[in-house]
Amino acid sequence: MDATEARGNLYRLLARCYREAPDATFLQQLETPPLSKALALVGMDLQETLSGLPREHRLETLAVEHTRLFAGPGKHISPHESVYLSDGSELIGSTTHQVRRFMESADLFLPVNSVYLPDHLSVELDFMADLCAREGTKTLQSEFLKQHLGRWIPAFCEQVCEETELPFYRALAELTRNFIASEQELLANQTTG
């Protein structure tokens, strides 16, 4: 697997984690040696993050925390860029439309039946994975990180780290923050030098 494919796979994995709570199949895949070793290389020791959760309640505990953190009801951490780049109250606004236009300018379109807004974290991460799979998109990747993901991910991840009750989601947020920062640096170097 080349570096670009590995980057795309990590974007896709992160998107999956923010879109929905892990199910049994997904956790099993995360615990397999190739994937668990790859995650350990980027700073996420899955066994350690899950060690405090009894196996018989693991899925339910992760699902409850995922819902509490990212969906509600009640106070939660919105996984939408528009909330971070507005005064905190705008869910669908100019930022949402800017993200959609950026994606469409790259000839990538959301499915008509998508339940997620274009500026949902999982959609933005999937978009980056799609760009990684296409030749000649490093400039687009760099621009998207600079204009969108890189502007709000640090605050989002900090909030997750502060509010989560589970090491799994703390490690996920730290991994996301570090990965996006390293991507910004990597792509800035590749597109300017």
Image (cartoon, rainbow, N blue to C red):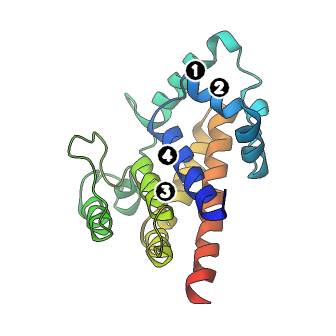
Is 32 on the left-hand or right-hand side of 65? right
Whole-angstrom CA distance, mark 4 to mark 2, is 17 Å
Label 3 or label 2, whichever comes before in sequence order: 2
Q: Amino acid at mark 2?
A: Gln
Toward which corner of the image does residue 45 lie, by quadrant? top right
Kindly identify which numbered label has been placed on residue 129.
3
- Taking the spot 28% from the left edge, 67% from the top edge, the residue there is 98
Query: Nearer the N terminus, badge 1 or badge 4?
Result: 4
Of 146 and 36, nearer the camera is 36
| Residue at image coords 65%, 41% | 170
Q: Position of residue 166 (x, y in %)?
A: 65, 31
Q: Earlier in the sequence, mark 4 or mark 2?
A: 4
Q: CA distance from mark 3 to mark 4?
A: 9 Å
Disc 2 residue crowd, few under 14, some 14–19, many 20+, Cα 10 Å = few
Q: How busy is the neighbourhood of tag 4: few (under 14 within 10 Å), some, or many (20 plus)?
A: many
Tell me if label 3 and label 4 are in contact, CB under 8 Å. yes
Name the residue beneath numbered marker 2. 28
Label 1 amino acid? Ala
Is the residue 134 above or below the residue 32 in the image? below
Indicate the secondary structure of the residue bearing disc 1. Answer: helix
Three-letter residue code for mark 4: Ala
Q: Earlier in the sequence, mark 3 or mark 4?
A: 4
Under mark 3, the amino acid is: Ala
Which residue is denoted by mark 4 in the rendering? 15
Tell me whether the residue at label 2 lies in contact with that at label 1, contact meaning CB atoms closer than 8 angstroms: yes
Foreground mark, 4 or 2? 2
- Residue 68 position in % (x across, y down): 48, 29
Q: Which mark is residue 24?
A: 1
